[in-house]
C-alpha cells in the first residue's frame, strides 16, 4: 500500500494553538544564550520523515529526497504529528507515535458498503483495487475493494490508514516565517 502523506495531510482535523498570531517569531534560548527559531503556529516548516506502521515496515519516507514543507497550525498534517513537532528547532530529531484518534481516526463500520457488481468497473473486481468516486455533495472519495462476492463488491470508504497507529521518525530541516521563494 503506497500512501502519499502530502495528499493525506489535507484531511486532518485539528490545529495547534500558537502564541502571538501567525507572523510572530517564536524563539528558544540555547545553552550558550543564543536564540533559535522553533516550530510554532504560522511557521513554514521543512522536514524529513519516515512513516512506519510498526517499528520496522516503512510505508513512506522522503529522507534523502525533497523535504516536506507545511504551515504549522494550518491542519496540513495529522494532528498528533503536528502537536509533537511544536517547539522543535532546526536539526532536532524525534520519534513520534500517533494513535488513530490523532491521525486518521478509527475504522468506521458505516463506511464499509456492499454494492452490486455492475456498479463497479470490471477491472476493479479484485481485492485491493482502489477506485475514485464522487460523494453526494460532489466530494472526491477513494474507496478500496475489500471483498468480491458472486453478485456484489465490498467497498471500504475509510482512509487506508484509519485505525492504525503511525510511527514517524522526523528531523526538522528548516523553519521560516514565510515560504521560501525560488
Image (cartoon, rainbow, N blue to C red):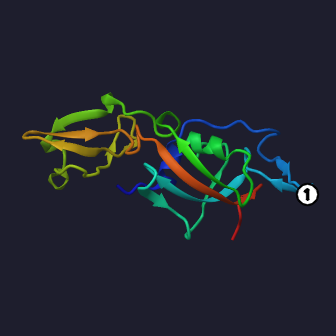
Q: Quadrant of the C terminus?
A: bottom right
* Residue 53, x across and y down, in percent: 43, 49
Closest to the observer, 166 or 129: 166
| Corner quadrant of residue 41 | top right
Question: In the rendered view, would you say 92 is above or below 73?
Answer: below
In the image, 116: left or right of 41? left
Other residues around mark 1 within 10 Å, as few (<14) / some (14–19) / many (≥20)? few
* Residue 18, x across and y down, in percent: 75, 39
Res 74 seen here: no
Give me the residue at 11% from left, 40% from top.
149
Closest to the observer, 92 or 44: 92
In the image, 120: left or right of 166? left
Res 45 seen here: yes
Circle 1 SS class: loop
| Corner quadrant of residue 32 | bottom right
Give me the residue at 18% from left, 36% from top.
115
Give me the residue at 64% from left, 41% from top.
83
* Residue 58, x across and y down, in percent: 44, 58
Residue closest to the far left: 150
Give me the residue at 70% from left, 44% from top.
86
**Residue at image mark 1:** 32
* Residue 126, x across and y down, in percent: 18, 51
In the image, 50: left or right of 141? right
| Corner quadrant of residue 174 | bottom right
Q: Quadrant of the N terminus?
A: bottom left
Count of marks, rendered view: 1
Residue closest to the far top: 110
Amino acid at each position: 500500500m503506497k500512501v502519499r502523506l502530502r495528499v493525506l495531510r489535507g484531511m486532518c482535523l485539528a490545529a495547534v494553538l500558537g502564541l502571538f498570531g501567525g507572523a510572530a517569531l517564536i524563539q528558544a534560548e540555547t545553552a550558550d544564550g543564543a536564540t533559535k527559531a522553533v516550530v510554532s503556529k504560522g511557521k513554514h516548516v521543512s522536514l524529513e520523515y519516515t512513516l512506519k506502521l510498526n517499528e520496522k515496515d516503512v510505508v513512506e519516507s522522503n529522507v534523502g529526497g525533497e523535504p516536506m514543507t507545511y504551515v504549522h497550525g494550518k491542519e496540513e498534517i495529522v494532528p498528533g504529528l503536528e502537536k509533537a513537532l511544536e517547539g522543535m528547532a532546526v536539526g532536532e530529531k524525534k520519534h513520534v507515535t500517533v494513535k488513530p484518534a490523532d491521525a486518521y481516526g478509527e475504522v468506521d463500520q458505516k463506511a464499509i458498503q456492499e454494492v452490486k457488481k455492475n456498479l463497479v468497473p470490471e477491472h476493479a473486481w479484485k481485492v485491493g483495487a482502489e477506485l475514485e468516486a464522487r460523494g453526494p455533495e460532489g466530494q472526491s472519495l477513494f474507496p478500496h475493494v475489500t471483498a468480491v462476492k458472486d453478485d456484489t463488491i465490498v467497498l471500504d470508504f475509510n482512509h487506508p490508514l484509519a485505525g492504525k497507529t503511525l510511527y514517524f521518525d522526523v528531523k526538522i530541516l528548516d523553519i521560516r516565517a514565510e515560504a521560501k521563494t525560488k
